[in-house]
Image (spheres, helix red, strand yellow):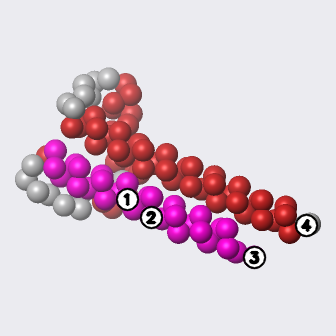
Amino acid sequence: MSTYNVTRSRNTAASLVRLACTALAVLLIAHIAFVLFNANFNNGLVSWVAQWSEVVGLWFVNLFDTGNTTFTIILNFGLAAVFWLVVTGIIARVLRSVG
């Protein structure tokens, strides 16, 4: 296998990981936006985003309790989104440099 194909494969893998984890961060940001703008949680999309945000938020979901529900959601889910973006960058960099 040529060096070009290996490099291209690594770049493709890194791009796919970056795309997937960025989608998770966008999901979390959408949940924050829905809460900020008082979206109707009886709506299918809004409830789906809220449900999956609980899963994607990992251990950040109930990390802080500020007493203000909106600020607590912004803080916890915002930290989870930043976490996914940082992890994405690290994993993508490792994938590109391995080999």
Q: Are marks 4 and 1 in contact (CB under 8 Å)?
A: no
State the SS at label 2. helix
Please name the amino acid that badge 3 sits on: Gly
Earlier in the chain: of badge 3 and badge 1, it is 1
User: Which residue is the extreme one toward the right?
Assistant: 1
What residue did someone put label 2 on?
86
Q: Are marks 2 and 1 in contact (CB under 8 Å)?
A: yes
Measure the alpha-carbon separation of dots 2 and 1: 6 Å
Extreme residue toward the left, this view = 67
Q: Secondary structure at mark 3?
A: loop
| Residue range corresponding to the magenta coloring | 70-99
What residue is shown with label 1?
82
Q: Quadrant of residue 62?
A: bottom left
Residue drawn at (52%, 64%), measured in percent from left and top? 89
Residue at 23% x, 37% y is 35
Q: CA distance from mark 4 to mark 2?
A: 31 Å
Instruction: Give the dominant element type of the magenta stretch: helix, strand or loop.
Output: helix
Height in image: 72 above or below 49? below
The span from disc 4 to disc 1 (Cα, nearest Å) is 37 Å
Q: Is residue 31 above or below residue 90?
A: above
Q: Secondary structure at mark 4?
A: loop
Q: Which residue is mark 3?
A: 99
Identify the residue under disc 4.
2
Q: Disc 3 versus disc 4: distance between alpha carbons?
A: 13 Å
